[in-house]
Image (cartoon, helix red, strand yellow):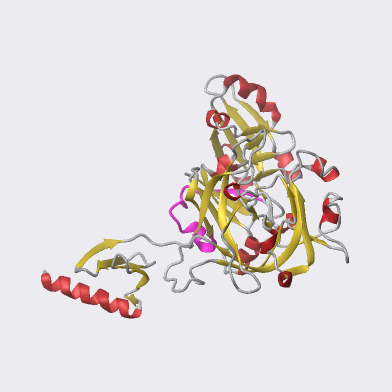
């Protein structure tokens, strides 16, 4: 037995000399503990040892590259005083090559622009074709009157450069600080020269990381001698160019599949979620191909989902349903929005829900376009959310203009967006 221990010790020390042995590679050395950590992706056995003549033998799970996400409480208002948010830490590389301090941005599937609150993160040398970014988040009424009290928004210059995901994304075998990070290279981003009621207060967020399609990432040409505030004063009502957003550009530049996977535990704090890109979106512990439901989505502006009907099932009494397929097909008003603090359903449900305050909401969604005609409605993919939980958290809203699976949905379902294939996969957690 002693001989086997000695051979194992020698083999592991030999592995340290070149970083790898039999597919098992060095990840990092912690000199303070005297530990060498060995990791691998093949699923084979991995070894670790303590230089002080002790070792352990263990089997490790397959490692998957991901970007850590944070659950946090964002800036609130009268309707949502303490809204839950999903955040990601990013760092901007300046024209001098140095990285900024980490900035916590809200991950937003309901917008398309990467925008930082701190205007000092922009560099004159990195300005992007004299573009400005300008947006309001209070609906059409705000575009007509941007000075309205319920009209959050911002305006600022656009830039093009490198942005890094902070927090040490789980990238195996990284050997330098540069390679330990995942990067979005030569991508468009904006900073806020002026903002109003935005997520711009440290622990409540430092901007927006919009990851939807380019329709909503709008670059406005600044007239010669003008400045971004000229756009604000006219409610961003000028001609614009559509510009593919930072994450979308990054994912599509990689080898297929072009996937974005979002996991969130529903809890507050760091590392309570994960953002997966490419193949890792369907090769992680949250994805289960046998349980994944494929739904029909459109690749235009939002991450839309083609809903067939919404059904309210109280604990007792009669079900109430509304067929919403025409609403969804005629406009981009049915979508998944991690930036929405609530689930939004038609106002026709409100009286019945106020009366019962229990049961579940069922969102029945069309299968992918090439499948739905061969599948019975009773077998359509369905998202189910608990009404009492939504009411208790203040996360249920009503509107006759849109049907939205907001942040409460993401706490219950792992979601994979295929940004080139027109479908989305959802897995109940």
Residue depicted at 30% across the width and 77% down the height: 15
Q: Which residue: 11% across, 70% down?
A: 2
Q: Can you say whether 1 is above or below 202 in the image?
A: below
Q: Quadrant of the N terminus?
A: bottom left
Q: Nearer the viewer, residue 241 or 346?
A: 241
Position in image of residue 420 (x %, y %): 64, 60
Q: Position of residue 243 (x, y in %)?
A: 74, 62
| Residue 96 image-quadrant placement | bottom right
Q: Is residue 380 visible?
A: no
Question: In the picture, residue 390 is in which quadrant?
Answer: top right
Question: Percent from the top left, x then y, of residue 340?
Answer: 64, 42
**Residue found 28% across the figure and 66% down from its top:** 48
Among the 4 quarters of the image, the one containing residue 259: bottom right
Inspect this view and state whether residue 229 appears: yes
**Would you say residue 279 sits in the magenta stretch?**
yes
Which residue is drawn at the image coordinates 61% and 46% (left, top)?
338
> Is residue 164 or residue 265 the one in the foreground?
164
Q: Which residues are magenta?
A: 277-297
In the rendered image, the vertical position of residue 185 relative to residue 68, given as above or below: below
């Amino acid at each position: 037995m002693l001989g086997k221990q000695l051979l194992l010790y020698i083999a592991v020390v030999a592995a340290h000399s070149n970083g790898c042995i039999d597919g098992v590679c060095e990840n990092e050395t912690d000199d303070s503990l005297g530990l060498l950590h060995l990791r691998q992706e093949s699923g084979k056995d991995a070894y670790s040892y303590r230089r002080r003549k002790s070792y352990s033998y263990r089997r490790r799970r397959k490692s998957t590259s991901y970007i850590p996400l944070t659950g946090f409480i964002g800036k609130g208002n009268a309707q949502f005083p303490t809204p839950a948010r999903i955040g990601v830490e990013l760092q901007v590389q300046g024209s001098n090559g140095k990285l900024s301090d980490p900035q916590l941005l809200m991950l937003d599937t309901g917008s398309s622009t990467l925008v930082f609150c701190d205007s000092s993160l922009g560099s004159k040398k990195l300005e992007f074709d004299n573009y400005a970014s300008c947006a309001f988040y209070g609906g059409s009424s705000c575009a007509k009157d941007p000075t309205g009290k319920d009209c959050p928004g911002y305006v600022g210059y656009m830039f093009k450069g490198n942005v890094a995901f902070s927090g040490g994304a789980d990238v195996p075998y990284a050997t330098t600080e540069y390679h330990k990070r995942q990067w979005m290279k030569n991508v468009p981003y904006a900073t806020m020269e002026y903002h109003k009621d935005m997520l711009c207060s440290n622990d409540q967020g430092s901007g927006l990381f919009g990851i939807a399609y380019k329709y909503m990432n709008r670059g406005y040409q600044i007239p010669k001698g003008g400045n971004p505030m000229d756009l604000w004063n006219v409610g961003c009502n000028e001609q614009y160019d559509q510009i593919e957003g930072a994450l979308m550009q990054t994912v599509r530049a990689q080898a297929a599949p072009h996937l974005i996977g979002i996991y969130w535990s529903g809890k507050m704090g760091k590392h309570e979620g994960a953002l997966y890109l490419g193949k890792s979106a369907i090769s992680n512990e949250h994805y289960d191909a046998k349980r994944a439901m494929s739904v029909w989505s459109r690749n235009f502006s939002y991450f839309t989902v083609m809903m067939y009907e919404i059904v309210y099932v109280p604990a007792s009494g009669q079900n109430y349903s509304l067929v919403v397929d025409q609403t969804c097909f005629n406009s981009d008003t049915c979508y998944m929005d991690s930036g929405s603090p609530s689930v939004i359903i038609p106002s026709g449900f409100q009286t019945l829900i106020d009366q019962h305050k229990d049961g579940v909401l069922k969102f029945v969604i069309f299968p992918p376009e090439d499948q739905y005609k061969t599948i019975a409605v009773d077998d359509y993919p369905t998202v189910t959310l608990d009404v009492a939980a939504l009411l208790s958290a203040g996360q249920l809203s009503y509107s006759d203009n849109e049907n939205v699976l907001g942040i409460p949905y993401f706490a219950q379902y792992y979601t994979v967006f295929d940004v080139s294939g027109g479908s989305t996969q959802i897995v109940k957690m």
